[in-house]
Amino acid sequence: MSSPAFATGRMLAVAVAGSGAVAVGERQDQTGAAAWYSPDGSTWVASSGAALDNGGLEMVMTAVAADGSGFFAAG
C-alpha cells in the first residue's frame, strides 16, 4: 500500500472489515505506536493521540484483528 499517511510510520499489520481497514505499526522515530484507518483501502488517515504515545519510549503495535464490534490491536 502506498499513501502519504504512511510517511509517519511503518505498517506491520492490517485487518479488514465491512467498515474499512485498520493498519498498525510504529512511528518512524520509534517513539510510539502508529495506526491508520481507511474506509476504502485506498485513502488512509493517520491516527494520533495519547493512546499511541509511550512518553518517548519505544512502543509498537504488531497485530490487529476485526470482529463484529470493531478492531482490536496489540503489540
Image (cartoon, rainbow, N blue to C red):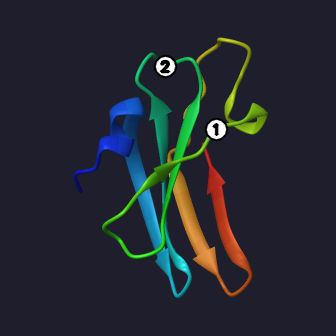
Q: Secondary structure at mark 2?
A: loop
Residue type indicated by callout 2: Gln
Percent across and percent down for residue 43 are 36, 63
Judged from this view, the residue extending furthest toward the left is 2
Percent across and percent down for residue 34 are 53, 38
Spatial CA span between label 2 and label 1: 14 Å
Residue 9: which numbered mark, if any? none
Residue at the image point whose x is 38% and y is 44% from the top: 5
Screen quadrant of the N terminus? bottom left
Percent across and percent down for residue 19 are 56, 82
Left or right: residue 48 versus residue 14 is right
Q: In terms of image quadrants, where is residue 28?
A: top left
Pointers 2 and 1 in contact (C-beta within 8 Å): no
Q: Secondary structure at mark 1?
A: loop
Residue at the image point whose x is 75% and y is 38% from the top: 51
Q: Is 8 located above or below residue 24 in the figure? A: above
Q: Is 62 located above or below residue 40 in the figure? A: above
Q: Is 65 located above or below residue 8 in the figure? A: below
Percent across and percent down for residue 47 are 59, 45
Q: Which residue is mark 2?
A: 30
Screen quadrant of the C terminus? top right
Q: Which residue is mark 1?
A: 48
Q: In terms of image quadrants, where is residue 55?
A: top right
Q: Is 72 located above or below residue 34 in the figure? A: below
